[in-house]
Structures are given as C-alpha cells and as structure tokens.
Image: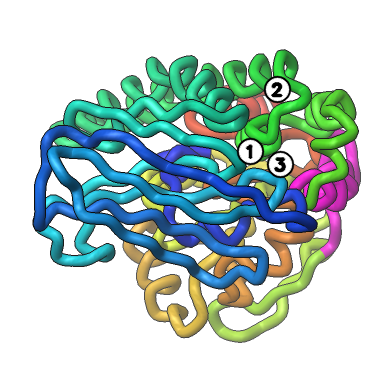
Amino acid sequence: MNLTSLKKITLTALAGIPAIAYAQNAPYTIQGKIGNYNAPAKVYVEYRDKDKKLVVDSAVLHEGNFKFTGQTGTSPVNAYILVNTKGSGLHASEDYRSLYIEAGTINVNTDDKVADAQIDGTKTNNESEKLRIAEKPINEAYDALAAKRKTATPDQLSALNAEEKKIDDQDAEINKKFIQENPDSYISLSSLESYAYSADYVDIAPLFNNLSPAIKASEGGKKFAERLPKLKAVALGATAPEFAEADTAGKTINLSSFRGKYVLIDFWASWCGPCRRENPNVVKAYNTYKGKNFTIIGVSLDRPNAKDKWIAAIHKDGLTWNHVSDLKFWDSKAADLYAVKAIPQNFLIDPKGKIIGKNLRGEDLQNKLAEIFGKI
C-alpha cells in the first residue's frame, strides 16, 4: 500500500483513526528531549478529539526538553508530534512522527530528528515502537528505492517497480506476523488495514477474528468489522460487484456491459505517484492483449473539480481504454464498493464476471495475462 505505499501517512489520516471509547477521562503526559534545541524552536502535538475537532498544543524547547499534559479518554488516540526549529508555526514544521495519546507518561527521545525518536512508556506506544523496529529495514528499502528513482532511466523503471512490489510483500508479512503475535494490541488494527491492501478476504478474516474481544469491540474494530462483508464481496472467486459511473464525456459506463471479456478494473488517480509510475506497465499489458478479448476500465479517485487533471493524466500517460470517475476522491462510490483504501489497486475479472486476480502489478500482471492468453 505503498501510498509510496501506505507508509506515507498524512495529517488528514488523523480523522480516520478513532479512539475506542471516551467514557472516562484520564491524565496523560508527553515528555522528552529532542536534540539540544532552544527558543525559538517549538514542538507541537496535533490530534483530533472525540468530536473530530482538530486539537493543537505547543511548547518551546529548552535544551531540547519539553512537556505536555492533558486529559484523554480510556483508549489510544492517534496523534502527531511535530518540530519547527525556527519557531515559525505548525505548518512550517520540518519534522514529525506519529504517537498515541493514552493514560500515562509517554516518553519521546531523539538526538536530532523527531522522525527518528524512540517513543515508549505506555502500552500502545511500546507496541508501536516494536512494530517500527520490525519495519525499519522496510522503510530503509523504500528510501533507497526512492533514491534510485531519481536517477533511473525509463528502461530501469520496470525493474524498480518490481523491486517495490517485493518490498510491499515483505511489509505485508511483517504486518501479518505482528497481528498474529499481538491480538490485544490497538496497533494490530492499523497493521490489519495495511495488510488488507494486498491480501484476500480468506487471509484477512482469520486475522481479524483472532483479535481480542476488547479490540474488536473498539470503534476502530467495529469499523473494520463493517468493512469485512465488502472485502468478502471482492474476494477471489466472487462475482465482481456491478457499478455504473460517468466517463470523461459524461456517458454512463456499466461494468456489466463488458461481460464476455477479461476486464482489469484499475483504481488510480492523477495525483497518485505510484499509480502514474505503474501506468507504463498497464499500457504495455493493454497494448499486448487488447486484441485477445481483454480490456481495462480505469476508475479514478480524482478530487472534485479536478476533471481537467484527470483527463490530462489520461492523455499524458497514453491510457487509451475506458475511464470513469465520480470525482469524489476517497468518497468514490466504486472504491467504497470494492473496499479500496489505497491505490494503485486492481481487480482482474473473467468473461463470466468472476474475480480471478487482485493487485496485479509489474511482472505479476504480465505473467497473469500470459497465463490466460499465452505469451506473445
């Protein structure tokens, strides 16, 4: 899920990670040391409260030391700690890191960048740190890959995309292992979201069912439970759910109108870097097999009022197949129907409408189509 993967967390994600309950209030402290910075350097904490209202607190650093105190509910709240060494405001922060606000004392310590800080002291933050350490080689691999992309030639990009897919697979295994070993961890819910990007329902459901009753009863657990039927509906072997959306000219296109063909439903967007990098591979697949009862429907998650950017990306990337979008960003009806929470993501449908492949990227897509049609 490379969002390059789901690893790219934005501050808007705060709204999507709810607390478990707010029945009681409990005191919390966030304290620590960030290098040896002094005024005007400031540290900020940002999170959303139970009413989804954005809350921001700040403190001036004194030889790197800082302290926040407050009241929280009985469950972890996802938050961000940010640093601006110039003291010029939250939105000019140079560095940030996620943490969980919960009852107790949370320690944040680093010699320099808060992104590299060790955060511990409470149950959820200790578990989050455990996962962060396990994923350190993965994040380093993503960073190394990003550096390679800066100097890569067009001929090298295909190999780099394949390398990215391998890293994604390794990341999925780490998340799966963490979930299995930590069924009573709030972190396992976010790990399950990450794992669900590349896994099928048959693998996802047992992991969720093995979570502790308390985690499944949490608000986040209940939301994931509500999502499970959608994941089941787009599992391998299921009949692809019908949808109808407008194409670039405003004409309604129905999925069922392509019955009798192999169809790749490709979820993407003009703003999605990983999608745009994958597009040459999708173009290659289309050009190779379009004469063999194969076609593609591109479903864009472009933003409202961004139709021009959507169409421009189609032309620039040479995507000469059918395209639809309701231009509702992450509120896309088709994306919700297919339980899509990250892109690029795709579903390969056979002539009878059955899902026979998912998340086929790079060589995986080429190999699957060669398996069906024979190598060309």
The colour scheme applied to this rendered structure is rainbow
Secondary structure under tag 3 reads strand
**Amino acid residing under circle 2:** Ile
Say if mark 1 contacts mark 3, CB within 8 Å: no
Q: Residue at x 39, y 19 (%)?
A: 136
Establish if 334 lies above or below 222: below
Measured as percent of width and height from the top left, residue 215 is found at: 80, 36
Report if residue 238 is visible in the image. yes
Residue sitting nearer the eye, 164 or 277: 164
Who comes first in sequence, dot 1 or dot 2?
Answer: 2
Crowding at mark 3 (Cα within 10 Å: few <14, some 14-19, many 20+): many
Crowding at mark 1 (Cα within 10 Å: few <14, some 14-19, many 20+): some
Q: Which residue is mark 1?
A: 190
The magenta stretch is 220-242
**Amino acid residing under circle 1:** Ser
* In this view, the mark in front (1 or 3): 1
Measured as percent of width and height from the top left, residue 334 is found at: 72, 64
* In this view, the mark in front (2 or 3): 2
> Which mark is on residue 348?
3
Q: Residue at x 70, y 22 (%)?
A: 179
Secondary structure under tag 2 reads helix
| Residue 241 part of the magenta segment | yes
Report if residue 363 is visible in the image. no
Q: Which residue is mark 2?
A: 179
Residue sitting nearer the eye, 364 or 194: 194
Q: Residue at x 59, y 43 (%)?
A: 102
